[in-house]
Image (cartoon, grey):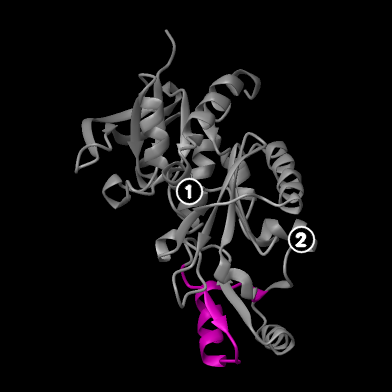
């Protein structure tokens, strides 16, 4: 009998926003094919004797109801019984995140895991972009305050952000050197990313969706008035967009490399036709937003690609 369980490792459903959340969007689509969704948080993942066990629950998602999820049955599940496991919790990319990838490594030859736990551990979403710096605005990664000071002096207006954060959190626009702020920032985050500010961010960035090594769609996210942050969680507005030939060429190059590294689902971001240095492989988002503005359902593409390729990736 075909295994019909999909496990999702994520944040508790009560913390998710059904209007924008990609995990719910993916789960809702595969439910239509009569797959059961088993949901658990990474802190409830264990190795017990020789088995990888998760304490969680079977769950049903329903966009039509105010409470968009229903817990059907609590369960301690041997994850080898699953068809697929989706790693979908938000970063920060911390020791708990890393430890969960080591645990899931133990069963990745038995169960297809999206994205591959070894790969998401090895691919720092921002540091990985150093392979493509020729496509990026001027960028440094450092915790040397003198180097950061020189970088700001050269470019006058820069963005600083943590290497291991997410959703536009802790990002600052600097136009003058503030030693107190920068020292505090380094103390909290260690290595940080500093990048020449791109003034055309007010026109929006472009999020490109990569599924199984293919460019499958894109949206533009326009910051709210007075903001330079294009994250939906920071009030940005999504609109339909077309990619330029340059963006397509860069996206294909990165998509090819990500597929080689067993990254099935990713999001890459452009500002003014330049990579902004974020190559999202941990829990890419935006599919629900794309559907809402275009009616293009990449959740269907996601599952079709995964189900058709599962036998070739073991």
- In the picture as drawn, the residue positioned furthest to the top comes out as 1
Identify the residue shown where x is 43% and y is 24%: 82
Q: Specify the segment rendered in magenta.
A: 169-197
Q: Which residue is labeled 1 in the image?
A: 286
Q: Are marks 2 and 1 in contact (CB under 8 Å)?
A: no
| Vertical order, 79 against 125 (above or below) | above
- In percent of width and height, residue 237 lies at 44, 60
Q: Which residue is labeled 2 in the image?
A: 135
**For this rendering, which residue is in front, 96 or 72?**
72
- In percent of width and height, residue 53 lies at 38, 32
Whether residue 38 sits left or right of residue 214 in the image: it is left
Identify the residue shown where x is 69% and y is 40%: 261
- In percent of width and height, residue 227 lies at 47, 75
In the picture, which quadrant includes the C terminus? Answer: top right
| Vertical order, 182 against 90 (above or below) | below
- In the picture as drawn, the residue positioned furthest to the left comes out as 66
Q: CA distance from mark 2 to mark 1?
A: 23 Å
Nearer the N terminus, badge 2 or badge 1?
2
Mark 1 residue element: loop
| Vertical order, 255 against 149 (above or below) | above
Label of residue 123 in the image: none
Q: Quadrant of residue 9?
A: top left
In the picture, which quadrant includes the N terminus? Answer: top left
User: Dot 2, how many residues are within 10 Å of its Cα: few (below 14), some (14-19), or many (20+)?
Assistant: some
Identify the residue shown where x is 42% and y is 28%: 79
Mark 2 residue element: helix
Whether residue 184 is in magenta: the answer is yes
Q: Is residue 162 visible?
A: no
**For this rendering, which residue is in front, 200 or 128?**
200
Whether residue 17 is in magenta: the answer is no
């Amino acid at each position: 009998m075909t295994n019909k369980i999909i496990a999702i490792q994520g944040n508790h459903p009560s913390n998710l926003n059904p209007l924008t959340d990609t995990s719910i969007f993916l789960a809702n689509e595969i439910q239509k094919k009569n797959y059961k969704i088993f949901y658990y948080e990474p802190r409830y993942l264990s190795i017990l004797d020789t088995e990888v066990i998760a304490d969680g629950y079977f769950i049903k998602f329903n966009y039509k109801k105010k409470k968009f999820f229903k817990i059907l049955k609590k369960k301690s599940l041997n994850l080898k019984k699953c068809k697929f496991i989706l790693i979908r919790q938000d970063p920060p990319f911390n020791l708990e995140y890393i430890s969960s990838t080591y645990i899931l490594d133990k069963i990745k030859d038995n169960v297809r895991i999206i994205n591959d736990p070894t790969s998401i551990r090895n691919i720092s979403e921002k540091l990985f972009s150093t392979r493509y710096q020729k496509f990026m605005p001027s960028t440094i990664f450092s915790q040397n305050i003198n180097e950061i000071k020189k970088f700001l002096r050269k470019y006058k207006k820069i963005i600083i952000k943590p290497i291991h954060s997410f959703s536009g959190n802790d990002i600052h626009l600097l136009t003058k050197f503030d030693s107190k702020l920068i020292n505090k920032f380094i103390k909290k985050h260690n290595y940080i990313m500093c990048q020449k500010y791109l003034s055309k961010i007010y026109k929006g960035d472009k999020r490109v969706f990569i599924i199984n090594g293919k460019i499958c769609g894109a949206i533009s996210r326009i910051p709210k008035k007075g903001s330079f942050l294009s994250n939906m969680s920071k009030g940005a507005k999504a609109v339909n967009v077309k990619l330029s030939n340059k963006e397509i060429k860069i996206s294909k190059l990165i998509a090819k490399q990500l597929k080689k590294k067993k990254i099935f689902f990713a999001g890459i971001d452009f500002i003014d036709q330049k990579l902004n240095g974020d190559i999202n492989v941990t829990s890419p988002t935006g599919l629900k937003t794309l559907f809402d503005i275009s009616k293009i359902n990449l959740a269907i593409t996601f599952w079709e690609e995964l189900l058709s390729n599962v036998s070739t990736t073991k």
